[in-house]
Amino acid sequence: MIKHNMVDLVGQYKKIKPEVDQAILEVLSNASFINGPAVQKFQKNLETYLDVKHVIPCANGTDALQVALMALDLKPGDEVITTSFTFIATAEVIALLQLTPVLVDVDPITYNIDPEAVERAITPKTKAIIPVHLFGQCADMNAIMEIAKAHNLYVIEDNAQAIGAEFTFPDGTVKKAGSIGDIGCTSFFPSKNLGAYGDGGAIFTNSDELAAKIRVVVNHGMTVRYYHDLVGVNSRLDSIQAAILDIKLKHLDEYGAARLKAANYYNEAFSKTDKIAYPKTASFTNHVFHQYTLVLNGVDRDGLMKHLNDRGIACAVYYPVPLHMQKAYLDPRYKEGDFPITEQLSKTVMSLPIHTELTEETLKEITEAVLEFVGN
Ligand SMILES: *Cc1c(COP(=O)(O)O)cnc(C)c1O
């Protein structure tokens, strides 16, 4: 029986239960399930939190990425550069729209897209770059924005894992993850750092023009009621989810601090062994620890995972198969060995429980169980 799960959404809910229950009841009592006042309120509050001009809520993070690409007027065969080490959704939407995903390797320390590899992958067909702020820290947005500017490319940030993280530019300017590129995308999947009690997502932009287009795309390509100027999709955040998210948004920074505290406890414990490389944070970003992911050095990963599970401790591998080795994405352009860092990470990473409700007692139990197996 697992007693320490990867997340503790029940424990988190208990602390905000009166507020959340009240907000849900309010939506029920006025039956404003779709596009109700709760959606507008949350949208405005998220715009303020991110310091971004427009937030367009949608149904989930995958839709957010798809709609972002649809808003850019790309043509089949146009190339979109992204990382080989991410959740499938990032590449899935590129392929779905008949665009060509161009994969590049990652930085071995942060596991985020390598800007030099991005630069090398640019061709005359390249139209956009999708950096992913993986596990909760920002990719090198200064380098990526410079490359995009030099080559006239769009940047869509996949911010599903790093809402609340901040990027510091060399001149000292600080911006929230997702507010830097042309468009930012996020997911409110329940286990994300800002999680709903169902599905949800949002798209961010500072461009009035892109915002207007995105609002049309998410609403069936409709400009005036029942007049459809382009082919769109149906992608909405419902009012119950918005009401819940609006409450959780107020706690987001405090949730981030709780995750960081747990991560620091882990780091300290694992700094004592060279069998584990604990996650490092780049100097230009903070880390909101969507995942606590370490790299094992000469440790039997399956054996360690079984050892932890036997002691009631959950653990997981994000992600065991690089994108270019996924069956649905096999492509003659790529073969095993093309992305050595991603391939090595997929064989050696392991994630431990990280959430807002971890006690020192639990952290002690988990770190001791890990160290017992790997030795010092
Ligand atoms: C969760 C996630 C998504 C997709 O979000 P959904 O809401 O599940 O569609 C996209 N990209 C990354 C990196 C994610 O972690």
Image (cartoon, helix red, strand yellow):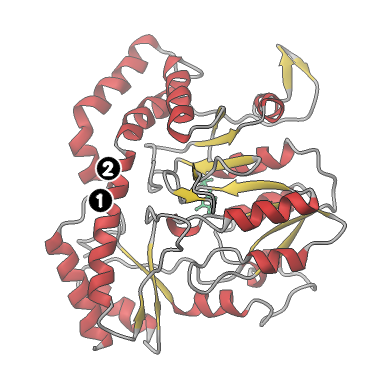
Vertical side of 44 occupied by 70: above or below: below
- Say if disc 1 is inside 8 Å of ligand 1: no
Vertical side of 27 occupied by 230: above or below: below
Where residue 56 sits, quadrant-wise, is: top right
Q: Secondary structure at mark 1?
A: helix
Q: Which residue is mark 2?
A: 254
**Residue under the image location 15 percent in, 69 percent down:** 364
**Residue under the image location 76 percent in, 69 percent down:** 331
CA–CA distance in space, label 2 to label 1: 6 Å
Q: Position of residue 376 (x, y in %)?
A: 24, 88
Q: Which residue is mark 1?
A: 258
Q: Position of residue 220 (x, y in %)?
A: 70, 25
Residue 10 vs residue 163, the one in the foreground: 163
Residue 238 vs residue 286, the one in the foreground: 286
Verify CB contact (< 8 Å) between mark 2 and mark 1: yes
Vertical side of 58 occupied by 167: above or below: below
